[in-house]
Amino acid sequence: MTTNVLVRAENVHKSFGLIEVLKGINLEVNSGEVVCLLGASGSGKSTFLRCINHLETLSNGRIWVGDKVVGYRQDGDRLYELSDKEAAKQRRSIGMVFQRFNLFPHMTVLENIIEGPVLVNRVKTAEAKRHASELLARVGLEGREHSYPRQLSGGQQQRVAIARALAMKPELILFDEPTSALDPELVGEVLDVMKDLAKSGLTMIVVTHEIGFAKEVADRVAFMHGGEIVEIGPPAEVLGNPQHDRTKAFLSRVF
């Protein structure tokens, strides 16, 4: 793992009306690092993840991915919010895998995967198809190019969603509780793919309730409570010897 900071969140706040969901998040993630965000439902984990790729706008603070401020263009000392089209262009380098697979039901697996590279990145169709087949083999779905989402299990659909995110060749990939919508017997097949991605050096930020996965794969885990990161460190420290009362209480319910 390198020590180059790829993601930097600085004093991130997010409110929905009068409800303050994020209350000053500060976090740096290095290139090649896997960081898992843990915490009870409603602690702000998914909202923070959506802020990283500007699916949610910040109420205050800044997030950088690489040398760019997410959602903004800097001109001298001033920041200007990007248009939707500009934000979508900036978002190309950030992959995201959602709780629900969000596959287009009327498209085949292959069509789902190549749409972004062909339409957004202007990759030639033949090249996009070749890469898509390689990615399907990587996620254990070789030969399913012409299947439709309805013909796949939930675990298989989520693996297609991972392949679709990888097809854009992102420098960062965000996972928002990618196994929470799956039947228990299908969780392992998705986690195995994610473990393989982590070993390959891909930078990953993962919102998860899979404590075993976090313990095995994460370089660091961050425990969130009430819109704040209350504890962060290596899994062995945070999960094995938590210091914050909220972390202790959460883990006592999980284990």
Image (cartoon, rainbow, N blue to C red):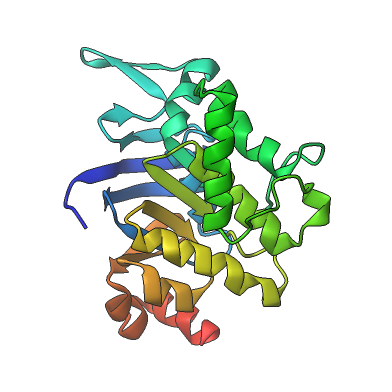
Residue for point 44% across, 47% down = 173
Residue for point 76% across, 62% down = 153
User: In this view of the protein, which residue sits in the foreground, 255 or 231?
Assistant: 255
Q: Is residue 228 visible?
A: yes
Instruction: Please state the total of marks drawn on the protein image.
Output: 0
User: In this view of the protein, which residue sits in the foreground, 237 or 153?
Assistant: 153
Point out the residue furthest to the left here: 3
Tell me the quadrant of the picture where the N terminus can be found. Answer: bottom left
Residue 23: image x %, image y %? Answer: 41, 48
Residue 57: image x %, image y %? Answer: 49, 31
Residue 80: image x %, image y %? Answer: 37, 15
User: In this view of the protein, which residue sits in the foreground, 14 or 82?
Assistant: 82
Q: Is residue 154 left or right of residue 68?
A: right
Residue for point 30% across, 49% down = 26
Residue 6's image quarter? top left
Location of residue 189 with respect to 173 vertically, above or below? below
Q: Is residue 142 left or right of residue 212?
A: right
Point out the residue furthest to the top here: 75
Location of residue 119 with respect to 205 vertically, above or below? above
Residue 120: image x %, image y %? Answer: 54, 23
Residue 242's image quarter? bottom left
Q: Is residue 44 visible?
A: no
Residue for point 59% across, 74% down = 188
